[in-house]
Image (cartoon, helix red, strand yellow):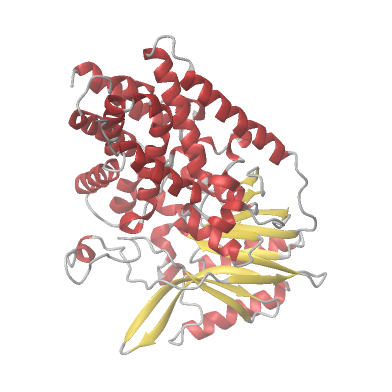
Amino acid sequence: MTRRSLALAFLSGLLLTASFPNPGYSFLAWFALVPLLLALRGLTVRAGLLLSFLVGLVFFSSTIYWVTNSIHVYGHVPLLPAALITLLFSAILALFIAPFGAVIVHIRATRPGIVVLAAPAVWVTLELARTHLFSGFPWALAGYSQYQALPVIQVADLTGVYGISFVIVLVNTAITELISGGKRIAPLLTASVVLLAVLGYGYHRLNAETGSGGIRVTVMQGNIEQDKKWDPAYQSEVIATYKRLTRRAIEQKPDLVIWPETATPFYFEGTDDPYPALTDDLRRFVRSTGTPLLTGSPTYEKKERRHLLRNSAFLLERDGTTKTVYHKIHLVPFGEYVPLKKSLLFFVEKMVQSVGDFQPGTEYTVMKVRLPSGKDVAMGTVICYEIIFPDLVRRFVNEGATVITNVTNDAWFGRTGAPYQHFSMAVLRAVENRVPIARAANTGISGFIDANGRILDTSGIFTEAHLTRTLVPGSITTFYTRYGDVFAWMCALGAILAVIPLPRSK
């Protein structure tokens, strides 16, 4: 490797970063990988591996830098170790990009004619692996950079977000081949046809008729400071904040009010004092409003001298009774539980004070909200970063949900790009399943997204807010909802076939 190739790889990492919020210059994604692909020419497989690892390290270090804030401010880890932990995490994530360069070098040396299609297939395969391996962390997949490009992202109802990533890398590869391949126009022609097909489908979907009816939803953003949220001295203040905002919102006659993740600073329906009294007080408040409430709350179950904690969401009826409960399925590693705690990582909980010991739920619970008309609206609720997992969200829709709600607490991120990145991923969940999304965060970004991915309304970060919108429930079952990541797995198969040596002719 030369200084030139290292500089090109570094540039690709920065261009990729800049295509995501913030700053969110999404057009950069369409040529961000060109410097890397140019630098890979003439390299060995090993050098290609190292160069792509560098791209990944630069990209993730400058995209998930907010992890430092989370574990320093709320995990109480000193700043330097927190930064080193983030760098280590970035290096682990970079391992999911490193094989890209090695495979491209290999394919160019053995079957250069297929590189224009093989490159995006390999990239999607690595994104799929990052989604599922080691608990999964599909943050900042290439396709998310286009969350505001509505005609481009409509194809996600067939391919999931991975289809958008495929097209982006396809265009990058075609541009590279044009620059370095002289008069070869086949790669550019291939990319142009695919891109035009995607755009044509996108405009068709955007002009298609939507369903009828609607549910009027209010989302609450209490903007409760994280270090005060669980302080008993501020307990009544936290509850009073959400009651005050709710009373204001009730004037707009919503069919449902949504409070954020763990909005109640106590164990709702807990049996130990003072939880029963606090639970009854909230039930009385809901009765007084006459409006169903969806709220996040930690819960526990006593079992054999210990408490099994869960991160839960409760749907309360107009009379304050509990109608449905959902327990979070996909927990945050090192946030809500410690992987391999009893064997390898027994020391982590002592280092990071905010790590919980939560138990995962097992059911994709669908909640039904009764409208004044007597009609029920089926709703799936995902908690916090569950919204970033495409397959998890689609399972709720497969179970019958026509509206997705997301309750979260993004205060952990601080004033970084993470709240914007987190919200952008919800846009793709709406398009993949053709369902609207209502999102309530403790602090921004709260808001609404329609079934075509249009952002209808948003709050700022670190501000109190209550937003109300009428959402049209989803009315169709998409290919993606029904069959999931078929496209991504086909890419994985294609990537494997691309690297298998062809039999030599005798």
- Residue 224 in sight here: no
Q: How many marks?
A: 0
Above or below 23: residue 330:
below
Left or right placement of residue 105 versus residue 166 in this view: left
Farthest-out residue, front? 506
x 27%, y 63%: residue? 353
In the image shown, does 233 or 279 lie closer to the viewer? 279
Where residue 100 appears, as percent x and y from the top left, is 31, 35
x 33%, y 68%: residue? 356
x 60%, y 34%: residue? 198
Where residue 125 appears, as percent x and y from the top left, is 38, 44
Residue 454: quadrant of the picture: top right
Where residue 452 appears, as percent x and y from the top left, is 66, 45
Farthest-out residue, top? 183
Placement of the N terminus among the 4 image quadrants: top left
In the image shown, does 402 or 351 lie closer to the viewer? 402
x 75%, y 43%: residue? 208
Placement of the C terminus among the 4 image quadrants: top left
Left or right placement of residue 468 versus residue 130 in this view: right
Residue 474: quadrant of the picture: bottom right
Farthest-out residue, right? 373
Above or below 198: residue 368:
below
Residue 108: quadrant of the picture: top left
Above or below 248: residue 97:
above
Above or below 177: residue 442:
below
In the image shown, does 353 or 136 lie closer to the viewer? 136
Where residue 172 appears, as percent x and y from the top left, is 43, 25
- Residue 506 in sight here: yes
In the image shown, does 56 or 298 lie closer to the viewer? 56
